[in-house]
Image: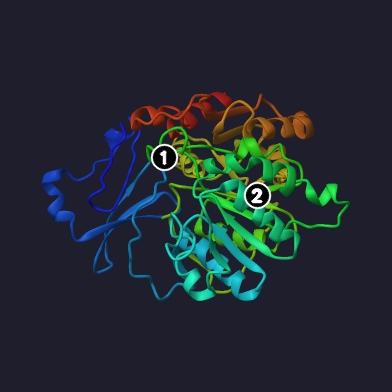
Amino acid sequence: MATLCQGLGVVIPLSSSNSSNFRLPSRRSISAWKDGIFVVRSDARVSQVLKTGGPNHELLIPNAVATKGGSSVASTSKPGHELLLFEALREGLEEEMERDPCVCVMGEDVGHYGGSYKVTKGLATKFGDLRVLDTPIAENSFTGMGIGAAMTGLRPVVEGMNMGFLLLAFNQISNNCGMLHYTSGGQFKIPIVIRGPGGVGRQLGAEHSQRLESYFQSIPGIQMVACSTPYNAKGLMKAAIRSENPVILFEHVLLYNLKERIPDEEYVLSLEEAEMVRPGEHVTILTYSRMRYHVMQAAKTLVNKGYDPEVIDIRSLKPFDLYTIGNSVKKTHRVLIVEECMRTGGIGASLTAAITENFHDYLDAPIVCLSSQDVPTPYAGTLEEWTVVQPAQIVTAVEQLCQ
């Protein structure tokens, strides 16, 4: 059952398999909680933090979800600073705009409104309306405008208010963004970043719950990355802007308010490297974006049952980091892929093919892939959860794989 507690500034969906282990305050007790807020951290923990900044208690939740931005008192003894994921994206974008005057932003409501999820909040005031450009509701037009700007030497960051809307710009992304460097004989580079929120999670309905990774992966000439923590969100944003290739940055709508401490000093991540989230010996679990937190929730249960899973956030959806993935497969000899993308023609299918082609001799069992069901995402919260992989399914899959 999907349980929502919105009056406290938090939205927490619970699967039916875990609802008995998790209790939220009843309506009668809300007054006792009104002086607190919830903060969901990037290790899938949710804390109630009082206005004084002291943690009251902590509870585990099965799904990583977004909350309203709370303000907990950061410890002065730790280096770095705490940011929510959308703030980390903004900080990376702002730093690159300060560093390079060729970096500009365009999209619907990205200017003085600050973007639909406030990633560009304050940038129009700081950099002006020409570098932070509000566009009409015409995705094909302003995506094409961004590609043309990239051809002339600018480094545009194009925001899709929702990734599903970028289907309207598919012609520009495919025929121009991905191919112009090749079809022009190398005369033009297209250093553009296309980014925006997507994924399943807040009863947004089928059209606003798209996972377009499977659509865009077939376009030659485009790199794709997916962020999952504030740290890698900022690092990937900066790397994407500096890349000479067109990059699509996938952000999950339910991860924007995850909080994490990131370094004060500048850093840039590689667009082609996976992240080792948890070393292990028994099975390799490959995942990305929101499913990283479902996997880590399942990993806690698996450890208690005696299994030692290795969890890798692949991050780079195209190309795959086959070096990191291959070394893990050679160690564990078993692979489980967990994705929110559709099963047919999804990232998991491509990853399965790549592992089979390159590391088949190291596998002791067939690759297992857990994906979203091939159905339009339902609006009803309980049905919506049924279409997406849940932690209990991951536990069962690992148990069967390791038999």
Q: Secondary structure at mark 1?
A: loop
Q: Which residue is label 2 attached to?
A: 274
Question: Where is 109 relative to 324, above or below?
Answer: below
Percent position (x, y) of residue 199? 49, 41
Asked whether residue 269 appears in the rendered view, the answer is no
Q: Secondary structure at mark 2?
A: loop
Find residue 44 and name its label: none
Viewer-closest of 290 and 194: 194
Q: Which residue is label 1 attached to?
A: 201
Quadrant location of the C terminus in the rendered image: top right
Is residue 217 toward the left or the right of residue 24 in the image? right
Quadrant location of the N terminus in the rendered image: top left
The three-letter amino acid code for the residue at tag 2 is Ala
Residue displayed at 40% across by 31% down: 385
Question: Where is 389 relative to 138, above or below?
Answer: above
**Occupied quadrant, residue 146:** bottom right
